[in-house]
Amino acid sequence: MCGIVGYLGKRPAQPILIEGLKRLEYRGYDSAGVALCDGTRLSVVRSVGRIGNLQQRLAARGDDPSSLGIAHTRWATHGEPTEINAHPHTDASGRIALVHNGIVENYASLKEFLVGEGLAFRSQTDTEVLAQLVGYLYDGDLASAVRAALGRVQGTYGIAVISADEPGLLVAARKGSPLLIGVGDGEYIVASDPSAIVPHTDRVIYLDDGEMASITADAVRTVTLDNVPVDKTEARVELSLEQIELDGYEHYMLKEICEQPATLRNCLAGRLDVRDGRIQLGGVAAHLRQLATSGRITLIGCGTAWHAGLVGGYLFESLARMPAAVDYASEFRYRNPIIEPGTVVIAISQSGETADTLAALREARERGALVLGVVNAVGSTIARETDAGVYLHVGPEIGVASTKAFTGQLAVLTMLAMTLGRRRHMSIGMFESLLHGLSKIPDAIARALEQSDLIRGIAARNVERNNWLFLGRGLNYPVALEGALKLKEISYIHAEGMPAAEMKHGPIALISRGTPAVFIATRSEQYEKVISNMEEVRSRGGRLIVIGNEGDKQVSGLADEFIPVPEVPEPLAPMVNVVPLQLLAYHAAVIRGCNVDKPRNLAKSVTVE
Ligand code: AGP
């Protein structure tokens, strides 16, 4: 997704802007640019491709002392990834520059109006329309011109704007696309993500939708689009730099896979009390009674978060005996969902900025549902727009492919299901047994991680094969889906996940000699049936890559490739069984020379619908 960085202060802006863009690289982009103001004029430099290309352009110009600037990494929505479409965009005078995340949905009608007013356009973007509109409305007061322009905009935006005619001012505004203001010592850094701010300060002001900030050397003045002043309080960013750095790993994804024992301990810390036999989920404590008596729970999310929702749905039904629906957030929103008094919607999101999930939760709230969040990014839009929620506390997830957030989501949903179960039908004995089992999951994941070299070998032996099937039953069905998604999105090998029983209803036609079929065959109620499914594939020449419990001779004897994992209580198994699949995808991608942390076409947070 696009990244925004802006700077106003005493230091040269250029190096701060470039460093900020580099910290946002993980979000995925295809072009980049900066605009600098030296007090009298604007310089705009843009380039296609990686930020290194932009740096070369800037180096050719020599050092720039400007202490005001804005910068952007673009993930193309309107218009090809070209230099002319890259941000910043300027108005007709070239004295106002603007960077934008989001989509101006009525850009065509605005463009038609401005053309009718005699303005000419250079790019194919919606953002240039916004920049030109600000210039058209500018009469010496940049903040007023920006506010007036945004009043005509339909759609979403996070923007930063500067003008050569007001060199001591940086304007920022947001609606539907995150933006925050880092508060330094006599300097301010605007960014779409805290990781661009953390190297300079941990003091931040979060802009909310419909707010606009005028930033000068001595203050930040925030108003609504109706020019009503808004008092904003400073918050502290929890991120630390070392959490962001690679910490010696080759890729963020491998770091985040391998740190799961630690991140899961963080997620459970302060919540899981084995000694006293309790779970404390402070963020939702006030709503547990409504949750436990709700006649309808719907879990919503996208991608990996949706897979976590599927596991959550199984667990709410099996542990809490509560009906739970699971829906893609994008489908939920447009499905005219039934929301009755007492309905609870649980929005799952690592980034807390996914547009589909945000739109769906807004729809649910609009209709009176109690909306809870299971979110990783502290202070994110989804986290701030739900009625309550539980943070994952697994730290920033940089790799585009979600890994530690997935196991964190599963841990939170498991604790929630156990908590509700204990309020309903679950015996103390079962609760305490699961509590003990959950406390051991980080160790079990650590054991599963020990198979990384074995899994690299399996990847190497199979990486040339295409059209992989991922198969599991019960709680291992969503794990199969997650394994297929991981492989697809970072190694570009096509893969499909499905319930193992479903294979015989059509997909088994895909099996030919050597077709890779990844089975999750850990001990469970449906263990014997999974073995039958493995036999069906084997008898047709398929290649069995199987995740099974340590020492399981029956499964390992059937498999062409066997990956052992420790046995844990069945409701907790998805957190362990997914780890080999994460490693399999990772190693396959590395062997294929793919860009593991920044896979093609993908973004870390999809903030457009
Ligand atoms: C997962 O590996 C993908 N990167 C993607 O499916 C992701 O899970 C999805 O876009 C949802 O993101 P969120 O959890 O930040 O809302």
Image: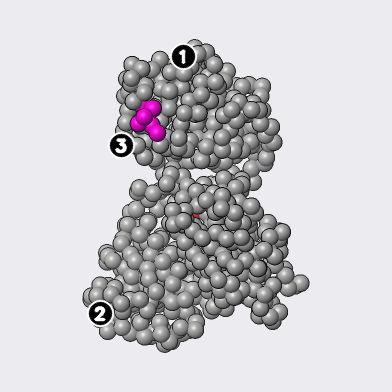
In the image, is residue 550 part of the stretch drawn in magenta? no
Determine the residue positioned at 42% across, 34% down.
104
Q: Is residue 227 left or right of residue 576?
A: right
Q: To which quarter of the image does residue 114 belong?
A: top left
Image position, residue 220 (x, y; %): 64, 27
Q: Secondary structure at mark 1?
A: loop
Q: To which quarter of the image does residue 500 belong?
A: bottom left
Q: Secondary structure at mark 2?
A: loop
Chief secondary structure of the magenta portion: helix
Q: Which mark is residue 80?
A: 3
* Disc nearer the start of the sequence (2/1): 1
* Disc nearer the start of the sequence (3/2): 3
Q: Which mark is residue 41?
A: 1
Image position, residue 340 (x, y; %): 57, 60
Q: Which mark is residue 541?
A: 2
Residue extending farthest right: 276
Determine the residue positioned at 35% across, 31% down.
108
Q: Is residue 336 left or right of residue 316?
A: left
Image position, residue 237 (x, y; %): 64, 43
Q: Amino acid at mark 1?
A: Arg
* Disc nearer the start of the sequence (3/1): 1
